[in-house]
Amino acid sequence: MLDSVHMFMKKTGQYLGLPADTIERLKAIDNEHLFKIHLNSGKSFAAYRIQHNNQLGPYKGGIRFHKSVNLDEMRALATLMSLKTAAAGLPLGGAKGGVTLDPQTLDEAELEELSRKYIAHLYPHIGPAKDVLAPDVNTNAKFMGWMMDEYEKLTGDDGQAGFTGKSVEQGGSLGRDAATGRGGVIALEDLLALEKTDDRAITLAIQGFGNVGSYFGVIAEELRPKWHLVAASDSEAAVYSAAGLSAKQLQNFKQERGRFKAYAQTNVAVISNDNLISLDVDVLVLAGLENAVTTANMKQVKARYIVEMGNGPVASEAYDYLTKAGKVILPDIIANAGGVIVSYLEWLQNKQGEHWTEDKVNRHLAKLIKQAVKNMYSSARADKLSLKQAAFAMAIQRLIEEAPGLKS
Ligand code: NAD
């Protein structure tokens, strides 16, 4: 995955006429924290915190608990985060963290112990002015609560602004849960409008119906009732109905730990994940993990629009093939920036001792996403770039202009 990100950075650097050593400096990672967490039960796990770049502000990035977490992925996701915060115009840098494990194999007490031990290792290197953590795959507000509590115990400092995606009771922001999905819906709405695509009756399929995917579906249902969700998947199977699915109902089903392979509703078929990718829909939303579309399945994609709600779901060769085939890909660093934008708003509220209404949070989110889509789209049109190249160019230009350490 890191190769894909570096490839896009290199191509963008060449397009911008930057010296090769500037891109090398942009690729460089500031700090890598690699360690083992040993639980009292004797189980032990590899853990990571990769701090890529803090030239624009404190490092910022999620924590993922997943069996496929590895160093290459962590480096790639940390780098993407620096580009994302830069493209969205935020005063933050980029980081990523994770632990390699299948969280289903641990009970609640072990997950808490793991979260606390993760912080016990890292606390000197993180905090509101150094590195701000957030939830990602298989982590949520509960994990942030454990981590913040451990940080405060160990440092004696107020750690509220060092963790975003907290529960509202612990100082979290209203609107954070839905923020990534909401930002994606706003970005897609604006893209379709710029493309002059009539969106009155478009069909959508969502791969990965977790936090991001399910809120994408629910917010789309709220803001764009005429978009039809026809399919959604989890890691095992997909559900499909040509007549349309209720995203809210599917979200409730998943929140009650339902598995799509056991979804039993009249007029809803259970299909394979591969089938979902190849459905003849207008928009394919990729909200699972990276490399969902690769050279192995890219030729099966029929959707004209692909929304990268996950990080790096379209591998670089597949990206080139699909864009040449006329597909329009809304890139991850813009499509899913809603999450880090509202994390930034949460950090700001915590630092200023404020608590904003959901409406105020959503208005700020919409403004920042709309601005990013508009800038990306006009630069792509003016300079004949793909949307991803245009988004990377925006990010790299900002980093170079505003980050003194990256100038030649
Ligand atoms: P999550 O754990 O809540 O959901 C992930 C979903 O993807 C789950 O439903 C899982 O079953 C499904 N999935 C995994 N592999 C799959 C496969 N091969 N096919 C179909 N479904 C599959 O995680 P999330 O927080 O929703 O994150 C999803 C993606 O969005 C990740 O790439 C993450 O880095 C990115 N992201 C998340 C946020 C955020 O705010 N949570 C912000 C920006 C980007």
Image: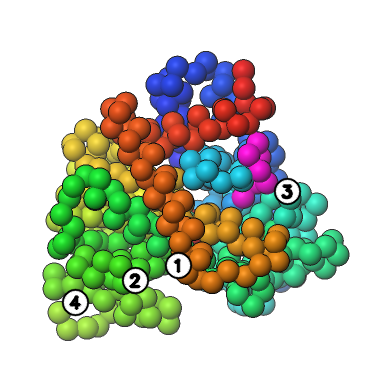
Is residue 51 visible from the viewing direction of this image?
Answer: no
**Element type at mark 4:** loop
Q: Earlier in the sequence, mark 4 or mark 1?
A: 1
Q: Are marks 2 and 1 in contact (CB under 8 Å)?
A: yes
Q: Are marks 4 and 2 in contact (CB under 8 Å)?
A: no
**Element type at mark 3:** loop
Q: Which residue in the structure is indicated by mark 4? A: 268
Number of marks in the image?
4
Is residue 256 visible from the viewing direction of this image?
Answer: yes
User: Disc 4 vs disc 1: which is toward the camera?
Assistant: 1
Q: Is mark 1 within 8 Å of ligand 1?
A: no
Q: Which residue in the structure is indicated by mark 1? A: 178
**Residue 218 image label:** 2
Amino acid under label 2? Val
Q: Earlier in the sequence, mark 1 or mark 3?
A: 3
Report the Cα–Cα distance between label 4 and label 2. 18 Å
Report the Cα–Cα distance between label 1 and label 3. 26 Å
Question: Picture coordinates of residue 278 (x, y %)?
Answer: 19, 54
- Front residue of 403 and 138: 403
